[in-house]
Structures are given as structure tokens and as C-alpha cells.
Amino acid sequence: MFQKVLISDDLGSINQGVLNCLETLGVKDIVQTQYCDDAYLQLKKADREQVPFDLLITDLSFKTDHREQKFPSGESLIAQLKKENPCFKIIVYSVEDRLQKARSLLQEHHLDAYVCKGRKGLTELTQAITAVYNNQQYTSPQVSNATHANLQLEIDEYDINLLKRLSNGYSQDEISQQLKDKHISPSSLSSIEKRLNKLRIHFKANNAIHLVAIVKDIGLI
Amino acid sequence: MFQKVLISDDLGSINQGVLNCLETLGVKDIVQTQYCDDAYLQLKKADREQVPFDLLITDLSFKTDHREQKFPSGESLIAQLKKENPCFKIIVYSVEDRLQKARSLLQEHHLDAYVCKGRKGLTELTQAITAVYNNQQYTSPQVSNATHANLQLEIDEYDINLLKRLSNGYSQDEISQQLKDKHISPSSLSSIEKRLNKLRIHFKANNAIHLVAIVKDIGLI
DNA sequence: AAAACCCTTACGGAATTCCGTAAGGGCATG
DNA sequence: CATGCCCTTACGGAATTCCGTAAGGGTTTT
């Protein structure tokens, strides 16, 4: 089993549960942090001292407080760590059970496991740790269909960009100008209308308001 | 200190943290549930057997799964319990740190404590339990300004109703018809426009899309 | 009782969104 | 090279939203 594991989660109560879980699995050396920046520092420090961690278990969303953070989210931390060392094992343990978020994480940074906090969260986490230890991937059943045969595969960064601008109160005309300024193509009003129309059909939305409400609900933006 | 406490939270990992916290405070008899319905049954059973609980610590949102539930949320459970016995002590322990939600809970059902899950969640929970034991109210600092001097006091049920319909994709014309059908006044298109205009100004929204995005973010709908 | 005020409703015009049609360019296939 | 396909862009008209003005009814103030 893993010897040295770092847990990063801003909710103290969750940390404690994961801690118990790891202890049960026989992990001797467990360190906890409540900030992504602290997690990063701990990992680097351990590397320097030749006593590196074997595994990171991290949440995705961290509440912001007075402390200025270099890594505001678990995702940014993961991106950096996987960039430095793709082999370093990382398990995400998050309440986020929305397919979109999970999918992008599993694909972009190739995580080792994605576990949803939930009624069976700790059970699944135990399975995930064992699987990852045996160099297997693990995904919670709730999002396991996120990787293959995703219905919403055709929605790309451009769409999300558009939806974000829309939700920030800009008119389609203004968005057209913004995209022209940033040399993002397509940028014509007509194309934007067309793309939003596709999104409306895709999400069965009656109008732009409905569309933004829906994609906010599913966590796309 | 309290003798018998019931914890209700669908996330197993959180349950464990709260459990430790209560044990440290010297609570002997602790029961956990992961469903609101189970919590209700436990409480009623204890009452019947003349060994009632002294306190309930509950989350607000519970993920739905295959099991059909009478109480889908912590809020519905709280409403029922406080209706049956206003003196029964209840502490909410939730990630929900949005003022609106906290405000309505503290006002409508007069809760005994509202604690936000967060970095200091367990510390605050300990304080809350002690306070409630001494018949005092407790509110996490994050939402403590939710009860008094609320900036958004003028937003009423009608406004929220309007915003919900809007976010559900209905045009202002359709909403006008719906309100006429339900005999809700004002119902004219003009009045609806006027009201939404006020809300736009209030929330500094550029248009209806922006407005819906904003009120979704702050948890008003 | 008159005046002031607030709320609901109506109306009209400008701006924006919605939606269909169509022209032009790039790219692959035959 | 021609053809077809897809994408971008343009255009036009209907529907909807946005915004100001104003009339009518009810209540409070003076």
C-alpha cells in the first residue's frame, strides 16, 4: 500500500473522514492541508528532502478567503503537478458529480481516479485508492459514463466561452465585437446567433435566458 | 452537555468528522443517518420509546438516489420538526453559505444554529453546539450578517416567482398569461417589464440573461 | 375635498433576439 | 478540375425585450 499520502480539502470534516479511511488501509504517513498552495509546497518540500509523497487526494473547489492563493482550485494544482510529473498519482475527491467537469479533468489532465463525495463516498474512495495503487484508473459510478460515449462531446471551448460572455450580460452584438478584437473566429453576429441556436436546440432551451439557466445548473459555466 | 444527538448528512465523510467532534464534546449517544426520512423515523421512534434525542445536526441538500423520499431536503425535514415541536433543537451544518438561503431558514423556521461547512467548520460546529446547549443561537461568521441589515430585503416572493419563470424559459408575455390564469396580481406585461427592470437595476444586470445568471449565482433561485 | 402619491395597466418606438434564406470560401472526394 | 459539403458571413423580417410616457384607480396626506 501507499506509504505517504497528502490530503488536500478545505473542509475539515471531510479531511477527517479521509484520514480514517487511509488509516484503515494501513497508510502510515498522512499529511493534511486546507489550501492548494500548501499542498504544492508540501509536495515540493518532500521531493527536495528525498521523501516524496506517493499519492495526492484532493478536492476541486476551495473556498477563497483572505489568503492570496497561487492555485485557486484543485484543477489548477492538478494541471501544474501533472505537467511537472505525469506519473505522480492523483485522486480527485469532489462533490462535483456533473459529467462535464469530470470529463474535462479525466481527459485533459489524465487523472488516476475521480471519486464523488456522496453516501458511498468513503467506500468508493477506498476502492479508488486500491485501484490506483495497482496502477488502474478508477471512476465513481455516477460519472463513469463521462469518459466514453458522452452525449455532449460536441460542445467545445468556444461554446463555453460564448455562454460565459452571454451570462455576463453582453449582447450578441457586443460579443461579436469582443471576439473580433481578440481575433477569435467565428466572430460575426450571424455565426454567434447560429451557434447559440444550436446550443438552444441541444439543451432544449426556449430562449437565451433559459439556455444560460440550464448550463449554469449543469455546471457547464 | 447533550446526551443524545442525531446526525443527518448524506456524505459519509462528513458524518465521521461530526462524530469525532461530538465525541470530543462528551456526547455518549450518537446516531447517524444518511437520509432525511431515516432521520425523521429515528426521531419519532425515540420519542415513542421515551428516550428522545436532544439535538439534530443536519445538512440541507441531500443527493437523490433510487430511494423514494418523503423529505427530499433538510429544509423540509426542519419545517416538519419545528411544526411538531418548536422547542426541539436543530443545527444546520451545510456548505450553503449564500445569505438568501440562510436568511430564509433562520427566519421562517427559527433554527438554533446555522454553521457553514468550511475550513473552520468543525471548530464553528463545536461553538454552535455549546451555544445551543446554553439556549443561545449561533450563526457562522460567513452568514452572520444574514439576519440583520439585509440589503435585499425588498425582494419578495413575487420577484422570485418571476425570476424562476423567466429562468424556466418563458417569455414575459407567457408569464403574464400564467399569472392571469393563477390570478396573481400584477399580471400585465407592462408590470412584469417594470418589475424586471427594477430587479435589473437592483442587481446591476445589463439584461434579463445577466439578471438570471446573477440571481442563480447568489442562490436566490 | 383636493392634492400627492403609489401601483397597475396601456401604448409606442428603439434595440435586440430569433429564425430562415442565401452567397462565398475552404477542403475533401471523385 | 468539378462537385459536393461544411463553415462563415450577410441580410431581412417577425417576435421579443427594453425603456419612456401616460392614463386610471386607490390610498394617504394636507
Image: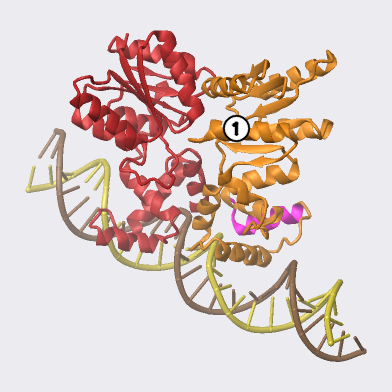
Chain colours: A red, B orange, C brown, D yellow
Residue B38, by quadrant, is top right
Q: Is residue C4 left or right of residue A114?
A: right
Q: Is residue B171 magenta?
A: yes
Q: Residue at the location (68% across, 21% down)?
A: B6
Say which amino acid is labelled 1: Leu
Q: Can residue B221 be seen by looking at this rendering?
A: no
- Between C17 and A83, the residue placed more toward the observer is A83
Residue B47, by quadrant, is top right
| Above or below for B62 versus B175 | above
Q: Residue at the location (27% across, 18% down)?
A: A54
Q: Main SS of the magenta segment?
A: helix
- Between A154 and B4, the residue placed more toward the observer is B4
Q: Which region shows up in magenta?
A: B170-181
Dot 1: element: helix
Q: Quadrant of the C terminus of chain A?
A: top left
| Above or below for B56 versus B114 | above
Q: Position of residue A198 (x, y in %)?
A: 40, 45
Q: Position of residue A20 (x, y in %)?
A: 47, 15
Chain holding disc 1: B
Residue B9, by quadrant, is top right
Q: Can residue A175 be seen by looking at this rendering?
A: yes
Q: Which residue is mark 1?
A: B125
Q: Residue at the location (74% across, 44% down)?
A: B108
